Amino acid sequence: MTVRALAEGEQLLTLRKGGIREENKHFEIEHDRFFLYPTFDHQRNDLVRQSHLPELARALEEGVWPDREPPAEALIQDGGIPQPDRVRIRAWAEVSASYLITDPRAIDALSPYYIWTPDYAEKRLAWKRRHPLHVIVLRTYRIPRPVTVKVRPEYQGCRSWIDLYRDLPFEGTPVLSDDEFERASEEIEAIASDAVPVPA
């Protein structure tokens, strides 16, 4: 769902603390630009704002399922979505800015720039409480034609980065105009820069 929201210009940032399978269990920005690989591990209705629930079912179209049909909506509610055989990659992103946040008020103030419920975003902040939350502002580009990629076992699970077994060109059209993106980036910076914790 997050990948689709980024590709549609409905979300401008991502919040990371590090996946369960992350080395050292901590998040690090490993690349300045990367392709957005859709995953289905955390697709649940209660994590997305009411206004974006119709998009959740459409997000399943990013997968190619064994029986050619996306999972039923009941599976979305239960969080029991099976993994697809293949996924469609249709966008890439570059890191425009990043911030470290510990203040829940900042996460709430940033809510216009993500589709999750504020409650879910604050839970991300509360997880591993001693570590700040990475707020990463992304400039997203739609590639000219979606590319279908086979889902390999090593791609699955809760992780931030995977290495694809094929080369893809970084080309395409930005999902937001320069003016729109610059205006939003300035607003995000005004909120997030005040929340950067002082190094110990």
Image: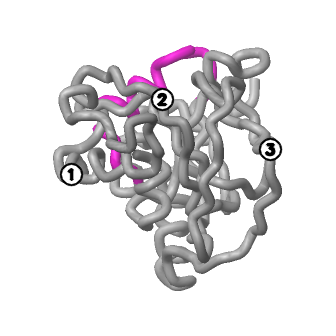
Residue 117 counted in the magenta span: yes
Q: Tell me the amino acid under the disc marked 1.
A: Pro
Tag 3 residue: 165
Which element is circle 3 on?
loop
In front: 170, or 145?
Answer: 145
Tell me residue 96's x, y (percent): 67, 62
In front: 197, or 68?
Answer: 68
In front: 65, or 31?
Answer: 65
Q: How is the image coloured?
A: one colour
Q: What is the CA distance from the residue labelled 1 to the residue labelled 3?
A: 32 Å
Q: Which mark is residue 20?
A: none
Circle nearer the viewer, 1 or 3 = 3
Tag 1 residue: 54
Residue sitting at 24 percent across and 44 percent down?
A: 49
Tag 2 residue: 83
Residue 54 counted in the magenta span: no
Q: Is 48 situated left or right of 39 in this image?
A: left
